[in-house]
Image (spheres, rainbow, N blue to C red):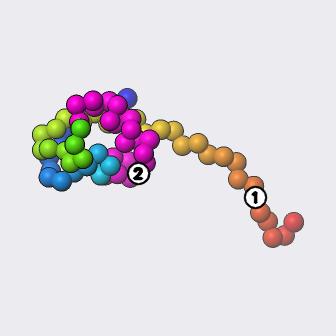
C-alpha cells in the first residue's frame, strides 16, 4: 500500500526521502516514485510538496551454500 508524505524541509530529494523512510537507496524505488508522482520534475522538492511513496519491494533471498570447515 502506498504512503503519502508531505515535504517539510529544504533541499530534500526523492532519493533522500526514500533513504530516510526505508533505509535503502536504489534507482528502482526512485523510478517508481517518479511514476507515482508525474508532477514532480525538479531534483529538489519544494516545501509543501505532497509525495506518494511506493511500497518497498520484497527481498528476494537466494539460497546460499553452506561452507563448513569440518566436512
Instruction: Tell which tag, 2 or 1, sits nearer the viewer.
Output: 2
Q: Which residues are magenta?
A: 18-40
Total tally of numbered discs in the picture = 2
Name the image quarter holding the C terminus: bottom right
Q: Secondary structure at mark 2?
A: loop
Q: Could you say where residue 68 lies in the image, as x and y percent from the top left?
A: 79, 65
In this view, the residue in front, 22 or 13, is 13
How many C-alpha atoms fall within 10 Å of the one at disc 2: few (<14), some, or many (≥20)? some
Up/down of 49 relative to 36, above or below: below
The N terminus is located in which quarter? top left
Q: Are marks 2 and 1 in contact (CB under 8 Å)?
A: no
Where is residue 59 drawn, in percent x and y? 54, 43
**Residue drawn at (75%, 55%), measured in percent from left and top?**
65
Farthest residue toward the right? 71
Residue occupied by mark 1 = 66
Q: Residue 23, image x and y in percent?
A: 38, 52
Residue 4 against residue 8 in the figure, above or below: above
Tell me which label, 2 or 1, sits earlier in the chain: 2
User: Secondary structure under badge 1?
Assistant: loop
The secondary structure making up most of the magenta span is helix
Residue 36 appears at what percent x and percent y? Answer: 32, 30
Outermost residue toward the bottom in this view:
69
Residue 38 in the magenta stretch? The answer is yes
Is residue 6 left or right of 67 when viewed as pictured? left
Q: Which residue is mark 2?
A: 25
Instruction: Return the residue nearer the eye: 13 or 6.
Output: 13
Amino acid at each position: 500500500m502506498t504512503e503519502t508524505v508531505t515535504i517539510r524541509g529544504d533541499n530534500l530529494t526523492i532519493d533522500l526521502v526514500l533513504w530516510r523512510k526505508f533505509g535503502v537507496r536504489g534507482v528502482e524505488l526512485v523510478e517508481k516514485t517518479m511514476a507515482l508522482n508525474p508532477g514532480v520534475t525538479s531534483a529538489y522538492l519544494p516545501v509543501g510538496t505532497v509525495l506518494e511513496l511506493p511500497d518497498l519491494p520484497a527481498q528476494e533471498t537466494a539460497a546460499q551454500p553452506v561452507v563448513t570447515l569440518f566436512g
